[in-house]
Image: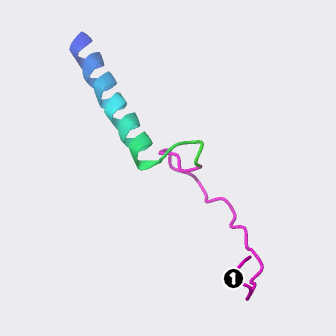
């Protein structure tokens, strides 16, 4: 039982490390957890001025 728990913990640590390395964190809104739906996209008005 202890070996099984150790294996699960080691796998979880590798997985969370990989998520952090890939930028898949809750803070960046790219969580590893699947979502039921995507958040709505924010459309910005088109401007011909390249400085905007």
Instruction: Using residue 17 as the reference point, say whether residue 33 is left or right of it.
Output: right
Q: How many marks?
A: 1
* Residue at the spot 74% in from the left edge and 76% down from the top edge: 52
Picture layout, residue 6 above or below residue 16: above
Q: Which residue is mark 1?
A: 50
Identity of the residue furthest to the front in this view: 51
What is the quadrant of the N terminus in the image?
A: top left
Q: Position of residue 18 (x, y in %)?
A: 36, 41
Report the magenta residues as a range.
29-52
* Residue at the spot 48% in from the left edge and 47% down from the top edge: 24
Q: Residue 7 appears in which quarter of the rendering?
A: top left
* Residue at the spot 29% in from the left edge and 25% down from the top edge: 10
Q: Residue 45 appears in which quarter of the rendering?
A: bottom right
* Residue at the spot 47% in from the left edge and 45% down from the top edge: 32
Main SS category, magenta section: loop
The answer to whether residue 1 is seen in the rendering is no
State yes or no: residue 32 in magenta. yes
Q: Nearer the viewer, residue 31 or 46?
A: 46
Identity of the residue furthest to the bottom in this view: 48
Instruction: Using residue 47 as the reference point, say whether residue 25 is left or right of it.
Output: left
The answer to whether residue 25 is seen in the rendering is yes
Picture layout, residue 18 above or below residue 30: above
Instruction: Using residue 14 as the reference point, say whether residue 39 is left or right of it.
Output: right
Q: Nearer the viewer, residue 38 or 29?
A: 29
Q: Nearer the viewer, residue 39 or 47?
A: 47
Q: Position of residue 5 (x, y in %)?
A: 30, 17
Q: Position of residue 37 (x, y in %)?
A: 61, 58
Q: Nearer the viewer, residue 36 or 52?
A: 52
Identity of the residue furthest to the top in this view: 2
- Mark 1, secondary structure of its residue: loop
State yes or no: residue 23 in magenta. no
Q: Dot 1: within a 10 Å radius of its alpha carbon, few (fewer than 14), some, or many (20 or more) residues? A: few
């Amino acid at each position: 039982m202890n070996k099984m728990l150790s294996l699960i913990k080691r796998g979880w640590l590798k997985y969370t490390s990989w998520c952090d390395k890939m930028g898949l964190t809750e803070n960046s809104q790219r969580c590893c957890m699947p979502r039921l739906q995507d958040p709505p996209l924010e459309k910005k008005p088109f401007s011909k001025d390249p400085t905007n």
